[in-house]
Amino acid sequence: MTAKKFVAYYRVSTRKQGASGLGLEAQRAAVEGYLNGGSWKIVAEFTEVESGRRSDRPALEEALSAARVHHAALVVAKVDRLTRSVAFLSKLLEAGVDVRFADLPSIEGPTGRFMLQQMASVAELEAGLISSRTKAALAAAKARGKRLGGHRGVKLSEQSQAAGRAAQAARAKQRATDLAPLLLQLKTEGITSAGGIARALTERGIPTARGGNKWSALQVLRVTERAGGVV
């Protein structure tokens, strides 16, 4: 049975707490308790010393990147350890990572995403009210005879296809960006050929973009090209 992969993220509010381990050990214990009894593996751990009100968290960005690289879930001890900002939760929803909370063990997968969406919807309420007022103003302008927008001759199917291609390209670019630090590390270790990198990624258990467990030289070349020619 293949072990489920997790990336653990811990946050403390002060550098004193970070140095002393106060709060940090409790979070580790909570995560270990949540994972207990299953086939699991923590592939990486990240600790942030930052205020919960700030959204620029480099350790969290690294944790999300590692989760994407390993196709792992991000696990945190408590919801409030992640963020108290619903606006930031909205950003997290777009990260493409499954998030787990040790204090809410039944919240995962689609249910967990729904919970985050509901929390984020609180912040969207005011934006929605503003949008309603804007639509009312546009309707009033249209009633006065002012032309607003209109069909530009592009078929909906063409627009959908273009949007799909753009989304796929964005995902591929994000994947390459996430892998770039590892590719650079392999290069410093003397592994520079596409075939050698493919073998190294396979040996380290890094899944391919589609979840495969074996890399090819061609896949490596495509990733490095998107990453800006790291190799």
Image (tube, rainbow, N blue to C red):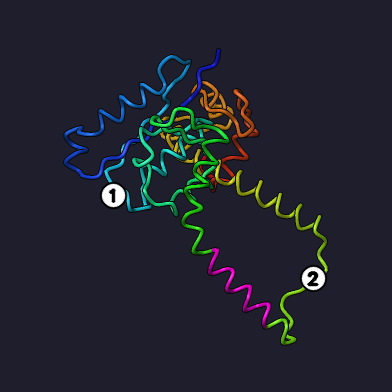
The numbered disc on residue 151 is: 2
Instruction: Check residue 166 in the rendering and tell me which mark sits there, or answer none.
Output: none
Camera-side residue of 42 and 220: 42
> Which residue is pictured at 33% across the width and 26% down the height?
30
Q: Is residue 83 left or right of residue 202?
A: left
Q: Which residue is mark 1?
A: 51
Looking at the image, which is closer to me, 64 or 189?
64
Q: Position of residue 84 (x, y in %)?
A: 36, 48
Please tell me how crowded label 2 is: few (under 14), some (14-19), or many (20+) other residues with Cα within 10 Å: few
Residue 137 in the image: x percent, y percent?
Answer: 62, 79
Q: Secondary structure at mark 1?
A: loop
Q: Is residue 165 magenta?
A: no
Please tell me whether residue 30 is drawn above or below residue 165 in the rendered image. Answer: above
Give the magenta-colored segment's residue range.
Answer: 128-140
The picture quadrant where one finds residue 218 is top right
Residue 87 vertical position relative to residue 62 in the rendered view, above or below: below
In the image, farthest residue toward the bottom: 144
**Residue type of the residue flagged with mark 2:** His
Whole-Å distance between the Cαs marked 1 and 2? 47 Å
